[in-house]
Image: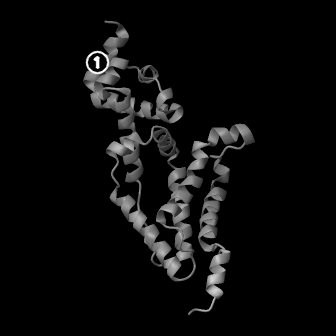
Amino acid sequence: MRPSQAGTSTIQRRNPEGVKADILRIATAEFIENGFSGTRVDEIAARTHTTKRMIYYYFESKEALFTSVMDFTFEQFWSRESLTDVSGLDPVSALRWFAEERFDAYASNAGFVRLLAVENTRAADHFATRFTRRPASEKRHDLVAEILARGVAEGLFRADIDAIDLRMLIVSFSSFRSVFRSTVSTVYGRDMLDETRMAFYRKLAGDMVVATLTTFPAAAPDDELMSSSPRM
């Protein structure tokens, strides 16, 4: 046995959970940086000072390793989630709070956002077989629906945008910075993750969402005609 292999075996026997955690940590970074198809198990083995065989001992396959990375990353993201009582805020203020709070969540978890992008290039295979909606996600969805309902009831918000539409609007803006960072930097010379612009982008997220929900679509000509026609 070569010295490097002997050393690796010793480490594995001494601290197998530590070795597994190290593989998972490095694999997460590799999948974030290179995507699924671009990630090489040989590179993960080299960076963790282990072997490809040892990685497959713990994770069976590259697919299984990616699944473990997704599980770990999602659990880390959801473990940081918390809700704030916004019942004392008016609907517009509550809406702005939600948009800026979601912006913060995605801004502080850029790796999570990029892994979501990787997962979507694979037709959400991981989601299809393993994803279950967390209680925190359910409560957050209900909170959004409640904010929207209050705003519509008070005549402040348009009624054609639901909670899923709103979350799509927020996620698209918030995740763009991480997913398209390299493209924007290459084409426009701007780093979308520049800390000095973070407060500006955070406020922009709130401005964008509030403006969208409080801008009522113009009535179509047929609608105007119907509303002005005398009722029989």
Q: Is 184 placed left or right of 145 in the picture?
A: right
Residue sitting at x 53%, y 83%: 154
Task: Identify the residue under disc 1.
Answer: 10
Residue type pointed to by label 1:
Thr
Mark yes or no: residue 45 visible. Answer: yes
The quarter of the image holding the C terminus is: bottom right
Residue at the farthest left position: 13
Residue 123, picture quadrant: top left
Residue 203, picture quadrant: bottom right
Give how far across and how far down residue 37 sits, in percent. 48, 28
The quarter of the image holding the N terminus is: top left
Residue at the farthest front position: 232
Crowd tier of the residue under label 1, counting other residues whose Cα lies within 10 Å: few below 14, some 14–19, many 20 or above? few
Q: How is the image coloured?
A: one colour
Q: Is 208 placed left or right of 77 in the picture?
A: right
Q: Is 194 placed left or right of 54 in the picture?
A: right
Give how far across and how far down residue 100 sits, in percent. 56, 62
For the residue pair 141 and 96, the one nearer the viewer reads as: 141
Mark yes or no: residue 90 visible. Answer: no
Q: How many marks?
A: 1
Give how far across and how far down residue 52 sits, in percent. 37, 19
Task: Name above or below for residue 117 compared with residue 136.
Answer: above
Residue 170, picture quadrant: bottom right
For the residue pair 160 and 151, the one nearer the viewer reads as: 160
Q: Is 141 placed left or right of 114 in the picture?
A: left
- Element assignment for label 1: helix
Task: Name above or below for residue 218 compared with residue 184.
Answer: below
Residue sitting at x 45%, y 77%: 87
Task: Name above or below for residue 4 compared with residue 150.
Answer: above
Residue at the farthest right position: 188
Residue sitting at x 67%, y 51%: 196
